[in-house]
Image: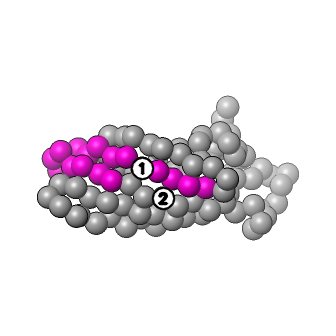
Amino acid sequence: MLRAELGDNYRMRGYYPGRYNGNTLITGQLELRQLIWQSLVIAAWGGVGSVFSPEDNFDTSKILPNYGAGIRWHLNTDTAIRFDVGFGRGCYNFILGLNEAF
């Protein structure tokens, strides 16, 4: 239960939590947000990540891709409602959340 999990509502959004786990988690992600009309913002992101355990050496062939897009409606400067759809290798994930992913 204390192992690192790849995928959640904030990082690697194309995977559901627990699908991939290990002792070490490495992720990287870039996100672009663009205001399109008053308080409506679109976002697009891409990233990579991997989890592994000490008995497994880091293997570049096990690096997983992640990409997606979303829309945000900013209610005020501190609060936003967001809907994201993320894609990973052989899976996808829909996320409805309050505030930004990061």
Report helix, strand or loop for mark 1: strand
Q: Residue furthest top?
A: 1
Foreground residue, 23 or 18? 18
Visible in this render: residue 78? no
Give the image location of residue 21, x and y in percent: 70, 44
- The three-letter amino acid code for the residue at tag 2 is Gly
Foreground residue, 25 or 91? 91
Crowd band around label 2 with a 10 angstrom C-alpha radius: few (<14), some (14–19), many (20+): many
Report helix, strand or loop for mark 2: strand
Residue drawn 68% across and 42% down? 19
Quadrant of the image containing the N terminus = top right
Please check the rendered image and state whether residue 20 is part of the magenta-colored stretch, yes or no.
no
98 sits left or right of 15 in the view: left
Crowd band around label 1 with a 10 angstrom C-alpha radius: few (<14), some (14–19), many (20+): many
Residue drawn 57% across and 49% down? 92
Mark 1 → mark 2, Cα distance in angstroms? 7 Å
Give the image location of residue 32, x and y in percent: 37, 67
Choose the circle earlier in sequence order: 1 or 2: 2
Check disc 1 and report the residue beneath it: 84
Residue drawn 23% across and 64% down? 35
Residue 29 image label = none
Give the image location of residue 3, x and y in percent: 68, 40
Q: Residue furthest right?
A: 55
- Write down the region rendered in magenta: 71-88
Q: Are marks 1 and 2 in contact (CB under 8 Å)?
A: yes
- The three-letter amino acid code for the residue at tag 1 is Asp
Residue 68 image label = 2
96 sits left or right of 18 in the view: left
Give the image location of residue 17, x and y in percent: 60, 40
Q: Main secondary structure of the magenta part?
A: strand
Residue drawn 15% across and 47% down? 76
Visible in this render: residue 81? yes
